[in-house]
Amino acid sequence: MPAEIPTPISHPGETASNDIRRRLAKVEPHALRTFTPSLAVLAKSAGSYHWTPEGRKLADFSSGVLVMNLGHNPTRWWKRVIEYLQLGGLKTAGEFCEAVTLNGYNAVTEVETIATERLVALMQKQAGGKKCEQVLWAASGSEAIQKALWAAMDRRPGEQMILSTRYGFHGKKGLAGAVTGSEQDSERDSRVKFLSFPREECLNVARRKQPIDLKPYEAELNKLWTEYGNRICALITEPYLGGGGSFHPQKEYIQLLARFCREHDIVFIFDEVQANFGRTGSLFAFTEYGVEPDIVVLGKGLGNGVPVSAAVGRADLFANMHYGEASDTWSANPLASAAVLATLDEYETTEVMGQAKKLSAVIEKGLLKLNELPIVAHIRGEGVVWGIECAPIRNTPADAVAKACVEACYRGDAEGRAIHLLGPLAGKVIRVSPPLVMPVSEAEEYLGVMYNIFAGVAKRVG
Ligand SMILES: Cc1ncc(COP(=O)(O)O)c(C=O)c1O
């Protein structure tokens, strides 16, 4: 029996958007998208807003998928991307421009060199990441995770086992997929062993402020060491469970993992693909959590929309890989390098992190107010990355409540104020992660809009 293809999403009154949704559904498999009940069609975007083809304005509470931390299409950022590619001014030569090549495979470019030097300098000097010595570039988060794991696995023959914290998300492809989720998922890689992540202990903002009892986690780590010993080459974790439902652990838990790795000479890989560039309140989450990883994996916000990722870590680990082992068509391409440089310029010369701190306080206050509503079970988060766990109401399960809230935010309030959200995470958690540059007054206004829309859902659903 052929698989059933879902009916393309459409919304009443959206003639132009529905036409685009319908045309795309014919030529693109639905598997390419993560299910999002709104499936907004975005005609243009600036700062913290999108506009649909019908001209409807949507406040962006998602930043793509935590990518556009500096907002959509920042003018100064774009100008710099172009300047970095031309390095000294555009010279036209007939039909072609004399500018930096867009693919320097089997060669190197100066723009790549500067981007790599600047990223290392920023992570080492400003953020204190002493082990951030070299950059292994990639094009997507999962590729950079795979490269970080390869580096750890290449270190010593026979050391091929990887520890991974349960319910994490590190990507879908290759080894990144193998270290994602838990042993319950199908097709597990026998080299990967999962360990507990303290979800109960950080179930909501109040619970996270209480101390964590580390003893059970210490015991579990010791048991794994007794069982597998120095067959273990790496431990990978995230600062917080992002895709796994927005669980932000106490820092002491992450520090315990780092300590365990240090004591047993295990490569500690910190997946900041989502958290990097300011989401947790610091430029890099490893400083926020007080750890010094052997490899930090970056992505998403690193290129502010241009696909680029990186595993940044110890030179001695990367040295074990042979020529070509981590090369591919897009890694360290000049467009990505220019985007990274323009992004670093913004973080180094503007008050974006100060703005993110102010925004964080406003988001926390606005979201905690949602606790008044019967459809909200828990609020979790830090910095500018938050989750609203929905509660079941009457006959409606929490997943359906979350879906109804995302749809209602997309439709907007009576004054036409609408909010663009990601589809729910882990079924019932709504993510709130606007660009760090969203003005505080706008965040306040739209959090109020969200409250009223959710209150309407609470009355209606059931
Ligand atoms: C923490 C984390 N690691 C890795 C990835 C995978 O990144 P990509 O989708 O670019 O492969 C993601 C993506 O959401 C992520 O959140």
Image (cartoon, rainbow, N blue to C red):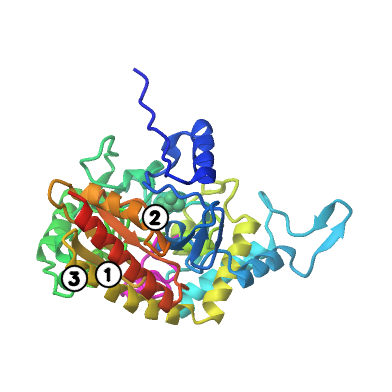
Q: Amino acid at mark 1?
A: Leu
The residue that disc 2 covers is: 410
Q: Is residue 446 above or below residue 170?
A: below
Q: Is residue 107 left or right of residue 417?
A: right
Front-most of residues 444 and 121? 444
Can the viewer see residue 421 in this picture?
Answer: no
- Which numbered dot is residue 367? 1
Mark 3, residues whose alpha carbon is within 10 Å: few (<14), some, or many (≥20)?
many
Q: Amino acid at mark 2?
A: Tyr
Residue shown at 43% from the left, 62% from the top? 416
The residue that disc 3 covers is: 208
Can the viewer see residue 449 in this picture?
Answer: yes
* Mark 2 within 8 Å of ligand 1, using the beta carbon: no
Q: Secondary structure at mark 3?
A: helix
Residue shown at 27% from the left, 47% from the top? 181
Q: Are marks 1 and 3 in contact (CB under 8 Å)?
A: no
Q: x, y percentage for residue 397?
A: 17, 47
Q: Are marks 2 and 1 in contact (CB under 8 Å)?
A: no
* Mark 1 within 8 Å of ligand 1, using the beta carbon: no
User: Per the image, is 290 magenta?
Assistant: yes
